[in-house]
Amino acid sequence: MKVETTQFKEVTAMQDEVDMQAYWMPYTPNRYFRKNPKIMVSAKGVYYTDDHGRKLLDGASGLWTSPLGHGDPRIIEAIQRQYHTMDYVPAFQMASKETFRLANRIAQYAPNGLGKVFFVNSGSEAVDTALKIALAYHRAKGEASRIRMIGRERAYHGGCVGGISVGGIPTNRKMFGAIMMPGVDHLPHTLNLSQMAFSRGQPTWGAHLADDLERLVLLHDASNIAAVILEPVQGSTGVIVPPLGYLEKIREICTKHGILLIFDEVITGFGRLAANFGADRFGVKPDMITFAKAITNGVIPMGGVIVRDDIYETITGIGGQEQLIEFFHGYTYSGHPLATAAAHACLDIFETDDIMARTKVLDQVLGDAVHSLKGIPGIIDIRNCGVSAAFDLEPIAGKPGLRGMQILESCIEHGILVRITSDTIAMGPPFVASSEEVQSLVEIFSKVVKKAF
């Protein structure tokens, strides 16, 4: 199926001008947006429709959130049924039986031994929760000196204080240094275009970069380090794929020194890497996994942390008297009934529609398509893993991010949506997209790039 483009010959507005004065948009250049607004008015299947009536192929699954496309009636019906039964139950001191059932289902998707699920409302909250669990675990073991966290350069772990502290994106950190966590250090990122440009899947160069963790252990002493947190594939910064052997070495070093390993799988979890989790794709088992986004297909906020069983047992085992709270943490909306219903519906769809099998097909289709663009002027790197890919573009001198923004606007004019991070373009189409739609996404993008350069 080709994306229809004749609709763009005559573009007319579908609605009155939007009053944009009150809304302060997140992670958006607000001044630029007001001059160049991009307003979506509806979504169905793998397409959005904007306020000019343009039908846009969703090449980014929303914000990596909607792998099942948009408007699936099975998710809507599940939410409606739950609303009529029970719209909310307090998250503290009580729970819905469906939330317990959901935790059991999610644990079945995780690697063996990770059998406890703590629910939150977003990926950002999931990261901060995982960091707290790490501290609580070491304290419960009598190792309260283990308070340091190790993140990685170019990592994105959400917008909460813990997440920006272990994260490694400078623009996320420079304004908020005064409130960031103390005692955080960072590993180098693994992207080196002189050694790995245009790698398909995992690069063969770079496993040695994991050895820097040993340097940090020597610097701080293992007795002071609580956890290392990594994205198996760094998503928000442009689909940076780990070198062969890299994650295995990180796991080995963490195990050797008693350091917990946290995989942030908010983007990579539930099929994005053509596996349940990145942990499965790369055969490396962490001690905790954070998740969000795909678990409810972006319909209702939900996230969580999947935790190794003995970590839970250690923390809850030192709670003192039984009526006392062992882990003083949680959110009003943890395990919310409507989010729980949406998550059950999404997992039902994953299972009944054999979504994982579709991701394995699209893994090959997307990889073939994006790497066919090698050699096009302006594209300086192409990377892919699972149903995700990224292109680095030649920037406009002295104007970082402008090239990416111009490409995004041109993509919209040509009927596709992509994700931009400065001058990097990412693609992560829905798993329910056809092979032809994925190929058309890349073909149209190639035309946009050729026109730009």
Image (spheres, helix red, strand yellow):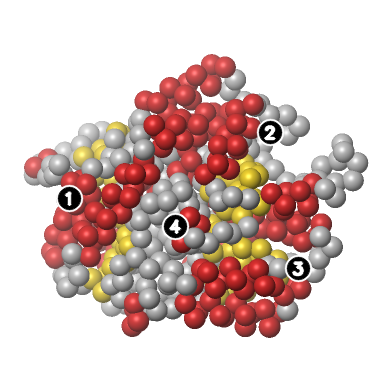
Q: Say which of marks 2 and 3 sits in front.
A: 3
Disc 4 marks which amino acid? Arg
The disc placed on residue 281 is 4
Would you identify the image quadrant in which residue 433 lies?
Answer: top left
The disc placed on residue 146 is 3
Residues at marks 2 and 4, CA–CA distance in whole angstroms: 33 Å
Q: Could you tell me if the residues under marks 4 and 1 are in contact, i.e. CB atoms within 8 Å?
A: no
- Identify the residue position indicated by label 1 in the image: 440
The disc placed on residue 91 is 2
Q: Could you tell me if the residues under marks 2 and 4 are in contact, i.e. CB atoms within 8 Å?
A: no
Q: Considering only order in the chain, which callout, 3 or 2, is on the residue closer to the N terminus?
A: 2
Residues at marks 1 and 2, CA–CA distance in whole angstroms: 45 Å
Q: In the image, residue 152 lies at what x, y percent? A: 54, 70
**Helix, strand or loop under label 3:** loop
Q: Residue at position x 39%, y 32% from top?
A: 352
Q: Could you tell me if the residues under marks 2 and 3 are in contact, i.e. CB atoms within 8 Å?
A: no
Foreground pick, 289 / 299: 289
